[in-house]
Image: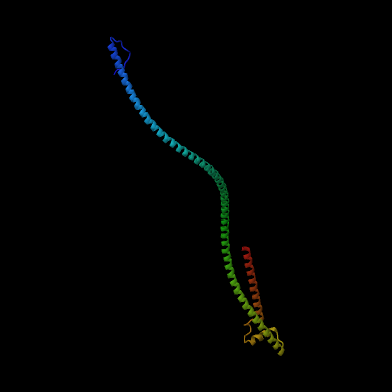
Amino acid sequence: MEQFGEVPSFTSADQEIAYWKARSHFYQSKYEDQRDQFDEFVKYSKDIEQELELELKQHESQNKELKSTLNRFIAENESLRNRMDQMNAEYNAQLTELTTEITSCRTTSDEVNAYVRELEQKNDDLERANRAALVSIQDFEQRLNAAIERNAILESELDETETLKEMVQRLKDETKDLEGELLLKRGAGTPSTPQDNKDAYRSSNGEPKGCRSSPLSVVHDLLRKFEAIKNNNSKISYDWVRQLDCKG
């Protein structure tokens, strides 16, 4: 149906009545359509309002829960903040303590390293001293072996000296016996010269003249040999002790 614009001019009353009836029906139909739409809108609005009220209640309940949760979170956050501040304070204290310990450990490490270097130096010195001591010990062993050999020689010479002492003593005894016999012969017979005494001694032993030396000369020779051996032993002992003192 066309919408009505300006009111036209009419040629008759019936035409005007028909126009206004048609226009009245148009607005009546439009009114009914608008009323139906309004009723639907009111109904829809009520439904929407109920839904919104329900949602509002739900949102209010959720909002209350969220506020409660928020308050709990705020309290927990405050507690966590306080705890974090406490932990930060403890951490800073531990960090300061650890820094002090690290500084102390570094100082101790430097001291230990210096002590280790000192010990290494002492160890090197001890090793050198040990090597020198080994060389000294080897040299001492060599000198000791030489001294043992010399001691063996000295002991052999001492044995020979003891043998010579016994021979000298025996010859001294024989000389005394011979002198006693000569004195007895001098007292019994004519005086004799020393040469006659020597010849008599050779004849009494059944030996020809000139085949044996005089016992006194033998004694003197043995005494000279004994003194020479004694002096030689003394000189060897002195040289050996002096050599040990010089090398020691």
Where residue 106 appears, x then y in whole percent? 56, 48
Q: Is residue 214 among what the camera can see? A: no
Q: What is the basis of the colouring in this image?
A: rainbow
Identity of the residue furthest to the bottom in this view: 188
Residue in front for this viewpoint, 236 or 16: 16
Determine the image quadrant of residue 184: bottom right
Across and down, in percent, residue 225 comes to: 64, 75
Find the residue positioned furthest to the top.
Answer: 11
- In-image side of 67 versus 97 (left or right): left
Q: Residue at x 30, y 19 (%)?
A: 26
Image point (69%, 83%), residue name = 194
> Residue 90, relative to residue 181: is it above or below?
above
Query: Residue 118 at what x, y percent from top left?
Result: 58, 53
Q: Is residue 196 left or right of residue 112?
A: right
- Count up the numbered dots: 0
Q: Is residue 11 above or below residue 67?
A: above
Quadrant where the C terminus sits is bottom right
| Location of residue 181 (image quadrant) | bottom right
The one of 117 and 24 positioned closer to us in this rendering: 24
Name the residue located 47 percent from the left edge and 39 percent from the top edge. 68
182 vs 240, nearest the viewer:
240
